[in-house]
Image (cartoon, rainbow, N blue to C red):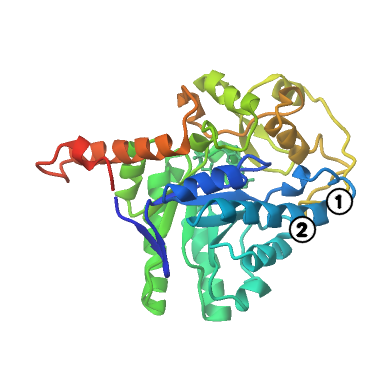
Amino acid sequence: MKALQIGDLHIKIPVIQGGMGVAISLSGLASAVANEGGVGVISATAIGMTEPDYKKNLREANKTALRREIRKAKSLTDGVLGVNLMVATSDYEEMLRISIEEGIDIVFAGAGLPLRKPVALHENNKTKFVPKVSSAKAARLIFQYWANKYNSIPDAVVVEGPLAGGHLGFKKDDLENQKFHLSNLISETVSEMKPFEQRFGIEIPVIAAGGIYNGEDMYKIMQFGAKAVKIGTRFVTTYECDASIEYKESYLKCKKEDITIIDSPVGLPGRVIMNDFVKKIQNGYTKPVKCPWKCLKTCNFKEVQYCIAEALFNSARGNMSEGFSFAGSNAYLATKIQTVKETIDDLIFEYNTKKYKSGTLKGKHASECHSV
Ligand SMILES: Cc1cc2nc3c(=O)[nH]c(=O)nc-3n(C[C@H](O)[C@H](O)[C@H](O)COP(=O)(O)O)c2cc1C
């Protein structure tokens, strides 16, 4: 398994833990993944809800909580740490500036096209910036815009396919369309990145996300040109994951048919595990929102059916009757809670076993290849 290089940043294990909100991936999970040689990612999505007085001023609470979690993670690991930001949130640029001030290694930016290069990035030459997109076209648009306007480009790109957990960048009807199979999206994005690699004389790693659950999936997608994988769902059922035991148990208990798509109040499809709360919202239940502020630029909180940040935070804290779990299409494969180390060891073992079976490790027994 080849290490991942993003500019001057060396990542021993090409596994990036997906940032998971609200309060699912904080310093606990992120530092544990970073300690195993992958990239641990803190989700900044509504992170301020973890502050006791967040209702008074969520914008301030977000900043305080993000600083707190980055500092805590850094005290627990010397490994590589990232923050996941949503471009569509109203404090995106502020949270990016805080991440840079706190010395985060990588900022991942999803949920919106980061066409404009944030001011804080102009003044920074250390933190890497990696957009998350759902198509090669979106990747090209961002890289083209940056290249023309700033004569610089992002450091890598994550491409997330339709099998991921959480909000999805696809129309509901396109989720099962083979055209959008992750392997196609990766091949297309790898080709789109070539002219930029030539123009700027650097390698742009394309990172695959969505539905990658084991080392075999990882090996397969890397044959299409992905240099690393970003995995969320598999890391939920770890001891170090910052979610409540009830949230993790919803993964252990669910069956394939329980994993379903909802129309999220933010206007995107979202993949969740069916429960009574999901049934209620599907039957038209509404919970009027008293919003202390608009966390999403586009949220019309007076008209939304319920506040999804609140529902996700409730479940993260174990109140499943007032919320639900986001989960990838493979969440039903979880059978037990493991440590992050066991999870990453399994990924490496499964990857090497597949590689051996594919004949690329001729003459070696898979068990000899357990370590990278
Ligand atoms: C529980 C959960 C919460 C998530 N929350 C966010 C989020 O707040 N922001 C975001 O950009 N992506 C979010 N994601 C997506 C992950 O960062 C990652 O891209 C995705 O999990 C990869 O697909 P997989 O779950 O099939 O591994 C979430 C995913 C899960 C499973």
Q: Is residue 176 visible?
A: no
Q: Residue at x 78, y 37 (%)?
A: 310
Q: Considering the numbered disc 1 on the image, is that residue within a helix, a strand or a loop?
A: loop
Q: Measure the C-alpha gap from mark 2 to mark 1.
A: 9 Å
| Residue placed most toward the observer, 331 or 150 | 331
- Tell me if residue 296 comes above or below residue 198 in the rendering: above
117 vs 238, nearest the viewer = 238
> Which sits earlier in the primary sequence, circle 2 or circle 1?
2
Q: Residues within 10 Å of mark 2 (few under 14, many from 20)?
A: some
Residue 350 locus on image (x, y percent): 31, 36
Seen in the picture, residue 213 relative to 105 is either above or below; the reply is above
Q: Residue furthest left?
A: 363
Marks 2 and 1 in Cβ contact (< 8 Å): yes
Lateral position of residue 128 relative to residue 371, left or right: right
Q: Vertically, is 252 above or below 190? A: above
Percent coordinates x, y for residue 288 in the rendering: 88, 34
Which x, y percent locates residue 88?
70, 55
Residue at numbered disc 2: 90
Q: Amino acid at mark 1?
A: Trp
Q: State the residue at coordinates (62%, 45%).
A: 26
Q: Tag 2, which secondary structure?
A: loop
Which amino acid does the dot numbered 2 rest on? Ser
Residue 317 placement (x, y as % from top left): 71, 32
In the image, farthest residue toward the front = 75
For image coordinates 75% across by 41% down, the residue present is 309
Can you see residue 141?
Answer: yes
Q: Which residue is mark 1?
A: 293
Between 176 and 89, the one nearer to me in the picture: 89
* Residue at the image point whose x is 47% and y is 23% from the top: 336
